[in-house]
Image: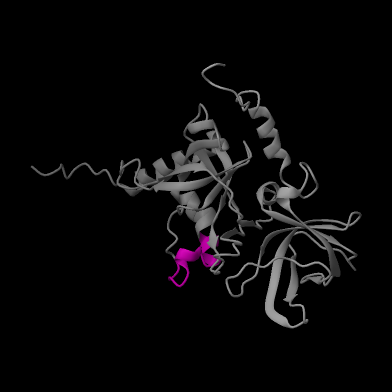
Amino acid sequence: MATNPYFKYNVRSEQSLLENLIIESIQMFGQDVYYIPREVVHRDMVFNDSILSRFKHAYKVETYLESVEGFDGDGDLFSKFGVEIRDAVTLVMSRRRWNTEIRQYVEAEGGTADTKNIPNNTYYRPREGDLVHLPMSGATFQIMRVEDDAPFYQLGNLPTFRLRCEKFEYSDEDFDTGIEEIDRMENFMAYQWRLTLDSASSGFTRNEIVQQTIVDSDNCKYGVELQGEVVEWLSDERHLFLAHVGADADGQFYRFETDKQVVGLSGGSVATVTGILEMQDIQPGAPGGATEMVDDWDLSALEYLDFSEKNPLTG
């Protein structure tokens, strides 16, 4: 027997009513988040590893935090490799609000790497690998799975997305969204170099690209331009902190050299490098260094873990 033709479950007016109620509920009981599309940088940086991905835009949209009692996942784990934070979260987003607040702008920018060279209107849902930043907790999550069929055609349509996200692990990505709360992640986690300079004509600005031409002992250019992004410039100490250092050249590793000039590509400042220090050697809490937060975790871990050397059988 066929279904009753006098009852229809896919009436457009009822679908719109349900969608309006969902949007109103999310706006009343949800949280504002920033959706951050990922852009893959196509550079051969196998040995002189630099930026793998960058995030240039952030779009605010409301979502509903499904796990209202707290973050899901395995929580905080203390292991021999340090502290691992394995929080997870499930967010519910309205499909209509996605199309209004995010989709049209992402497609206008060309989309992420997997949508380039593809006609418009293909960025039809959130993508795995993109990020979601929660201002409420200050945490950033990576989208691992997007469910676009739950609830499953209750009124003949799919009004929401469910984003299953896990805590984002920073891996030297470049953040230039223009939102300080998000972009400062580089200050805490990016692998940095500290250059001591003799002077700088007009100083350096944050996110400016600084370049040095690598030359040999006979002053013959290799044709390699080593670049880095400015994290912080301390004019009094003449310390320049750089992240994402690399040379898009022959796949070999290069590093900055002393007694050679560096040039700011935006401001035009020129200075000579007198000293070089990698981030791992910078003292905890140093300006531009990002080790203060990590050291706080390490110190607190000593209260729970016993690192003393002793015989476990004799005590």
> x and y percent of residue 119 in the render?
43, 71
Q: Quadrant of the C terminus?
A: top right
Label count reads 0
Q: Residue at x 54, y 66 (%)?
A: 108
Q: Quadrant of residue 81?
A: top right
Considering every residue shown, the one lying at the far left of the view is 1
Residue 217, placed above or below residue 11: below
83 versus 109 height, above or below: above
Quarter-wise, where is residue 62 in the image?
A: top right
Q: Nearer the viewer, residue 283 or 188?
A: 283
User: In the rendered view of the protein, which quadrant contains the N terminus?
Assistant: top left
- When asked about the image quadrant of residue 117, the answer is bottom left
Q: Give how far across and how far down residue 219 sits, in percent.
A: 78, 81
- Magenta span contains residue 282: no
Judging depth in this view, the residue of 18 and 287 nearest the camera is: 287
Q: Is residue 12 left or right of residue 209?
A: left
In magenta, the rendered stretch is: 104-120
112 in the magenta segment: yes
